[in-house]
Image (tube, rainbow, N blue to C red):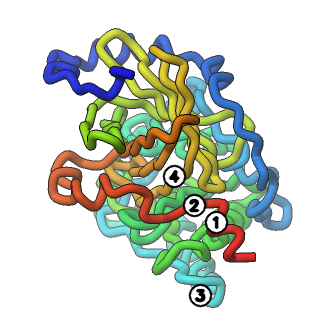
Amino acid sequence: MSFFRPSQTLLNGFSALLLTATLAACTGDAGRFIELADASEGRGIVKPAGSRDIVDSTPRGTLDGRDLTQRVLVRPRPPKIIAEDYNSLPDALTFAQRAATGDMSRVRGARWTEAAQIGLLFGSPEGKAFLAGKDGGRALVRGEPAESCPILNVALAATDDQATSGAMRACLNEAANLPDCGCRLIARGEHLLAPRDDFAYAIGVGTTLIDGTTNEAMVYASEERIVEGRPGARHIWLLGINGPVGLLQVEADGRAAMTLNATGARYDGTHKADGFRRGRVARRAYLSDQNGRSMIVLVGYEDSEFKDNRAQLSAWNPYGSLLLKKAEAE
């Protein structure tokens, strides 16, 4: 299979206009390429009393005009509202209530900003869900530190207090499985509670495919999409000059699968999310086809990070077999 023989000019001239045109070819129907049953559907979702929904189970892919015309309050030195674990959650919730209520527009240096100018809110499914909850209580929580804690949870509820509790609890449930991770409230109601730079969101990210046999690499632009009705699942399209070349699907329980457009070949395996880079999650996937040919897929790592850590990032599956880990845990 010649798919992995790299072309030196693969990305030359790959402009933003071409990326936009290519994305138009990635329809939601393409999700049928990969079928992965959700073995853990419904687990890990925490709802506060009176909550309408924990939105990471039904993320939004689109926004309407009213969503985009709303404003949020940006503060020059927002407070750090972090829960390291459930023991520190009550204090964090009390702090959140004090820090994001009342007339915060009187805070020195605070200013109202159009929500459409906040990349994470406008670009990510969780951010869109937050904007869509403008008529009730809402909260957005991210793993802390963000660089190594790939968690983003949004909650809508009758009040901001209920939404904050729901989003924080959902985040802490995920953080319990990650070393040295806490949860930080970054948005609540109309208030942004993290620095403006923390809301950066890359429109597209790079993805590197590494042939496990030859160690040769190919680099593509890529775009991540939600998988409707599947909490935590994502589609990552690999985009070449002439259009999509492959589709990687990652599941919340660590499973992953990929299909290649040119050959129809399918690869199955596991993935791990390392943390946020410019608002997007950096992921590693370790996959094999039915003939045992291996492939590593690296999504969203910065160029300098990849160059400095190529040996580590291209090492074959340091996390081991997902099924073996589950058996050991039991």
Task: Specify the label residue 88 is tagged with.
Answer: 3
- Residue at figure coordinates x 34%, y 9% from the top left: 242
Q: Residue furthest bottom?
A: 87
Q: Does label 3 or label 2 sit earlier along the sequence?
A: 3
| Earlier-in-chain disc, 1 versus 3 | 3
Image quadrant of residue 167?
bottom right
Residue type indicated by callout 2? Ser
Q: Position of residue 168 (x, y in %)?
A: 63, 69
- The residue sitting at 25% across, 37% down in the picture is 216
How many other residues sit within 10 Å of disc 2, few (<14), some (14-19) or many (≥20)? Answer: few
Mark 4 and 1 residues: CB-CB less than 8 Å, in contact? no
Q: Residue at x 44, y 71 (%)?
A: 144
Q: Residue at x 66, y 44 (%)?
A: 133
Q: From the top left corner, tell me how far across and down residue 21 is, in percent.
A: 38, 11
Say few, some or many: other residues with alpha carbon within 10 Å of mark 1 (under 14 / 14 to 19 / 20 or more).
few
Question: Observer-nearest residue: 45 or 32?
Answer: 32
In the rendered image, the vertical position of residue 99 relative to residue 187, given as above or below: below
Q: Residues within 10 Å of mark 4 (few under 14, many from 20)?
A: many
